[in-house]
Image (cartoon, coloured by chain):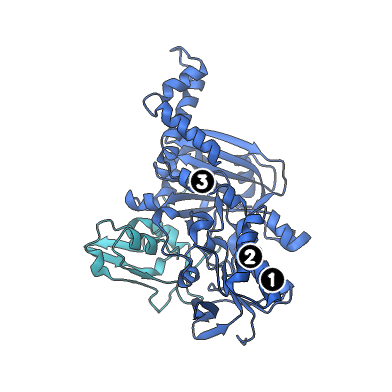
Chain colours: A cyan, B blue
Amino acid sequence: MSTEENVTLDKRLMLINFAKDPEPFIVVDTEKCNSCKTKPCLYICPAEVYTWQEKLNYNTEGCMETGACLIVCHKLGAAAITWKYPSGGKGVAFKSG
Amino acid sequence: MSLEGFEVAVVGAGPAGSAAALTLAKEGVQVLLVERGTFPGAKNVFGGRIYSYPLKKLLGESWKEAPIERFVRKEGITFMTDDSAFSIEYESRDPEGSFTAKRAKFDKWLAEKAEKAGASLITESRVDDLIIDGNRVKGIVAGQDKIPTNAVIACDGATTGLARKAGLVGMLEPYQISMGTKDVIELPSEVIEDRLGLDSEQGAAHVFVGSCSGGLRGGGFLYTNKDSIALGMVVGGEDVSSKQTQASSFMDRLRKHPKIKRLIKGGKTVEYDAHMIPEAGPKMLTRPYTNGMIVAGDAAGHLLNNGYTFRGVDIAIQSGIAAAQTVLEARKRQDYSENTLRGFQTKLRADPALKDMYTFNHVPAYLRKSRLYSIYPELVCAAAEAIYRVDGTGKKKIFKELRTQAKGRISIFSLVRDMIGGARTF
């Protein structure tokens, strides 16, 4: 048996079902992020919802709903994230968990 | 479904919520169980193992209908460096003490048991708020619906949304959380059994400490399902953030270790999971009750990582049962104020399973010692290498060798202090 090729995060995220929530459930005041020195959201998020390209970008479609970004942003970062769960029935669904 | 006339609303159909709803429904209470996923379990993630005892208590003999993957018979721990591994393995006597499972199946099954007992389950419903009147919780708000109830049991998970709304907790600190990630890797059942040395249908649980977390607070875990291996990493919230290492990168670190590589070779990764783990214990909330509301399960910090056993589901179920019993007493007295609901606290401390949380309440602080994730695993492996290697350069007696290996890595003072601290903590 061969060893599986490198499993990248993109490949991992393709394995999970996401039902898009038309309502924004994460809103970031990205102005605040410009002066954020620590940017902890970039590291804590297991789905890398948050990326940095000259400014903070975020794509909630891969959000795994752990809620950790909110904590590190408010305690270590710029308190820029407003977070709630996606609407009922929307967002991530795991087959195994 | 009419949303009027419910006596109790239970928010979240995870193990705590379903156990609470089931306990209440059995006593004839009109209970509404609210879940935001498309089905109970759709949103829920864990490492992989459930201890059986609370299910026996909750369901009697029918607990064996649970969607069990494998009963765990082998317990193991590995201390690792990048190129070495020191493992200890134990074959346990208790044939049915714990089992591996998949939450998408298990939580669904448990919620069905609650429904069969008479609880009303609604799914795809996010509870946004509490109905608060003065200093009293009087129900829940889910979308357009305001649902008045005598009591609310909040089992809404690690993000503790409702406890925060009720003023029982502020925002957690990063050191009070960990981030867990997990790959589910499919392999034929015989391959799993051969590689882990298991009889047919038996399961294994294994923990990894050392280089896989790159010196950060945390470690790896492995659980065997029937046809898959659940392989995961847990890392400290403060460490991931401050060391600027992506939480998802630790899975690859673990998978690249030669010992792990062999175990998962030829496997197919079929799912990636993630979960935030509250690590503060029951003191996470100032109190797990207020007028008209009780908080149970992860939302109340009711789980236990004592360094060698990781207990979420069993403690959540016990916590849910205790919450429901408290509400039953309140119902009898027709008094849902905190005067009655503080009985929950007494139950938590008296319950033989739940009091483990208090027995090990110094563990979280101890586990923040960074030496546990760097120097100690390295030392264990270096000592084993020194003991087992024969290369003709001359051997020392074991104790002398241990002292040589420890020299320069850690002071005897720190070592002794950590050992005494450990003896008191664990």
- Please rate how many residues cluster around mark 1, counting C-alpha atoms within 10 Å: few if below 14, some from 14 to 19, many from 20: some
Quarter of the figure that contains the C terminus of chain B:
top right
Give yes or no for contact between labels 3 and 1 (Cβ–Cβ under 8 Å): no
- Pointer 2 or 3: first along the chain: 2
Task: Give amino acid for label 2.
Answer: Gly
Pointers 3 and 1 within a single chain = yes
Q: Residue B215 placed where, x, y %? A: 39, 41
Give yes or no for contact between labels 2 and 1 (Cβ–Cβ under 8 Å): yes
Separation of marks 3 and 1 at Cα, in angstroms: 33 Å
What residue is shown with label 3? Answer: B363
Q: Residue B212 placed where, x, y %? A: 43, 42
- Pointer 2 or 1: first along the chain: 1
What chain does mark 1 sit on?
B
Q: Residue B7 placed where, x, y %? A: 64, 80
What residue is shown with label 2? Answer: B343
Residue B71 appears in the picture as rendered: yes
Residue B105 appears in the picture as rendered: no
Separation of marks 2 and 1 at Cα, in angstroms: 9 Å
Q: Nearer the viewer, residue A96 or A81?
A: A81
- Please rate how many residues cluster around mark 2, counting C-alpha atoms within 10 Å: few if below 14, some from 14 to 19, many from 20: some
Q: Nearer the viewer, residue A83 or B326?
A: B326
Separation of marks 2 and 3 at Cα, in angstroms: 26 Å
Q: Residue at x 34, y 50 (%)?
A: B245
Task: Give amino acid for label 3.
Answer: Val
Label annotation for residue B329: 1
Quarter of the figure that contains the N terminus of chain B:
bottom right
